[in-house]
Image (spheres, helix red, strand yellow):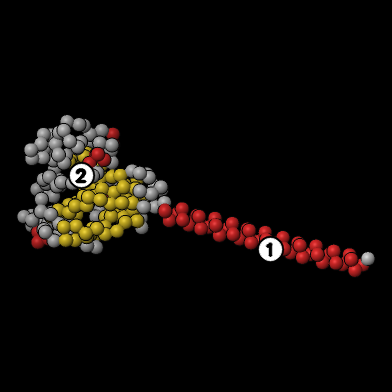
Amino acid sequence: MLRQLKKKRGMATVITTMIILVASVVLGSGVVIYGTSLFQTGAQSETISTQGVKLWVNATASKGISWGAAAVRNTGDKIESVDSINMRGITVPYANWYYANSTNSLANIQDIFVYGTNDGTGMLKTYSSPPGGNPSTDQCAGNTASPAFVIDVDGAGGRPKMCMIQASGPISLKPGDSVVIYFHLPNGVLNTVDAGATSSVSLYAGKLGAPTSVTIANP
């Protein structure tokens, strides 16, 4: 009788140990699967795309007046902020950024950005009547109702004008949002001899972004 009792206790101990081992394996697998899923979600959720990047330097201005333009789109599923534009080791200050993110302006995101003309001190002027075109009749509205300048790439009957306002800090983009940015490079970053050369400019949203090689045009 005593021998049978010991045998039953031994079997119970073995069964209990097996249950604990199985539970540990299942729990461990769950942690690994959850951790992997969490890592993949995080890795796939933060992306931006940059397109239409342009650089211009005035080949006749001794001050090296130069501008750039680019469109940035948040292609991830988290809010991102475009917070840095760099060229040749120089960071372009926020006060030199001008951007358009209204519905009207974003109709131009696939277009070829244009320089227009500057006012002689380096600031771009409103460019609303391209050669062969007529001034666009649409109005700047929303947060672009009082723009610093306006760029119209093709005149009336085509794309609406881009109403550019001055930035004061990083530009926040919700998932799917886009922005067109014109940026005034500090004098001396590019010089008259750079026209026709190839250089790179970097736009970043935190750690997202990469240098883009661009041929520097003479407006």
In-front residue for pair 39/5: 5
Residue 216, numbered label: none
- Residue 42: x %, y % from top left: 45, 54
Kind of residue at badge 2: Asp
Would you name the residue on which mark 2 appears? Answer: 111
Q: Quadrant of residue 199?
A: bottom left
Label 1: state its secondary structure: helix
- Residue 70: x %, y % from top left: 23, 50
Is residue 144 shown to the viewer in this render?
Answer: no
Is residue 52 shown to the viewer in this render?
Answer: yes
Left or right side of 171 for 125: left
For the N terminus, give its image quadrant.
bottom right
Tell me if mark 1 has few (under 14), some (14-19) or many (20+) residues whose alpha carbon lies within 10 angstroms of its own: few
Which label sits in the foreground, 2 or 1?
1
Marks counted in the figure total: 2
Residue 158 against residue 187 in the figure, above or below: above
In-front residue for pair 51/201: 51
Q: Residue at x 19, y 57 (%)?
A: 214
Q: Residue at x 24, y 55 (%)?
A: 92
Would you name the residue on which mark 1 appears? Answer: 21
Left or right side of 87 for 4: right
Q: CA distance from mark 2 to mark 1?
A: 63 Å
Tell me if mark 2 has few (under 14), some (14-19) or many (20+) residues whose alpha carbon lies within 10 angstroms of its own: some
Residue at the farthest bottom position: 3
Label 2: state its secondary structure: loop
Left or right side of 107 for 219: left
Left or right side of 194 for 110: right
Kind of residue at badge 1: Leu
Q: Quadrant of residue 13?
A: bottom right
Which of the two discs, 2 and 1, labels the residue nearer the N terminus? Answer: 1
- Residue 160: x %, y % from top left: 20, 36
In-front residue for pair 57/78: 78
